[in-house]
Amino acid sequence: MTQQTTEPRLIIFDVDGTLSDSQGDIAGAMAQAFQSQDMTPPPHDAVLSIVGLSLEVAMPRLAPEADEATCIALVAAYKQAYMQRRLEAGAAHSPLYPGIRELLDQLAAEPQTILGIATGKSRRGLLALLENHGLSGMFHTIQVADDHPSKPHPSMVMTALMEAGVPAERAVMIGDTSFDIDMARAAGVASIAVGWGYHPATALEAAEGQAADMAALRSEIDRLTGGPA
């Protein structure tokens, strides 16, 4: 049986591929960005492989032949295309995965459970997504690409721990990419790999927990953080 404690715990979520299914929007915006520079868009699998990285790190991986100026132009074009897609799609943009809203509501209702986010998205993009899905104000600590080195650098997780006032052993990072798992490990925090995201299971084996569905995710959260108060 999981030993419960009255100490607060911190549950940190990645966003793209973990909370929301944004691959269509990401791939579409990336294709538009490359086309704006008269370049052939990268394959879909290649685009998914960089989800989670900051754009300034991801773009040179997708266009290794491009010079710095072109990569900067690609980043700007991607941001513009992604924002336009979000405005056009409205509430249908980057839908939450089934069961995510219910899980977040359950966790948020627990007095000693603190929710956080660590994402490669920009603050503007993240806040728009949270507002779009009625999640504004649910997360106590929000870490975005604007303020930190790209994943897997541990800065996002370490800052979240500090803001929440929670020790590493009472926290867990939940994500769908190897960048999330490596970031958590570098910060001394356990991680859970979800099975519905963008990196293959073989890339996520280093995670302390694995979750194929929401019930398993809830169980792994409690197991790795000592349970709710």
Image (cartoon, rainbow, N blue to C red):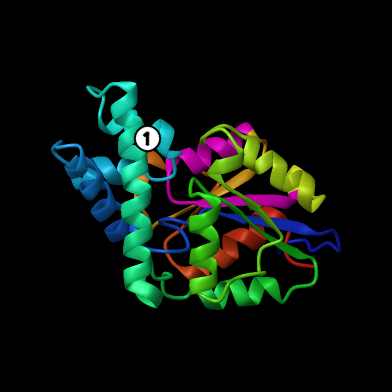
Left or right: 109 in relation to 73: right
Which span is picked out in magenta?
170-186
Q: Quadrant of the C terminus?
A: bottom right
Relative to residue 150, is residue 102 depicted above or below? below
- Residue 17 in picture, x, y percent from top left: 40, 56
Q: Is residue 204 magenta?
A: no
In terms of depth relative to the viewer, which is nearer, 167 or 35? 35
Q: Please tell me whether residue 36 is drawn above or below residue 84 in the rendered image.
A: above
The three-letter amino acid code for the residue at tag 1 is Ala
Q: Position of residue 59 (x, y in %)?
A: 33, 34
Residue drawn 31% across the image and 63% down it: 85
Which of 20/223 is in front?
Answer: 20
Q: Position of residue 62 (x, y in %)?
A: 27, 33
Q: Residue at x 26, y 52 (%)?
A: 27
Above or below for 40 versus 67: below
Q: Quadrant of the N terminus?
A: bottom right
The residue that mark 1 highlights is: 58
What is the quadrant of residue 82 in the picture? Answer: bottom left
In the shown orientation, is residue 154 left or right of residue 229? Answer: left
Decide whether residue 183 is among the magenta residues: yes
Instruction: Report the number of numbered marks.
Output: 1
Residue 199 visible from this viewpoint: no
* Residue at 86% over, 63% down: 6
Residue in the foreground of this view, choosing between 16 and 30: 30
> Which image quadrant is residue 208 in?
top right
Residue furthest to the right: 6
* Residue lying at 49% horizontally and 51% vertically, measured from the top left: 175
Q: Say few, some or many: other residues with alpha carbon within 10 Å of mark 1 (under 14 / 14 to 19 / 20 or more).
A: some
Picture quadrant of residue 38: top left
Check disc 1 and report its element: helix, strand or loop.
helix
The percent coordinates of residue 72 (x first, y second) are 36, 32
Residue 61 visible in the picture: yes
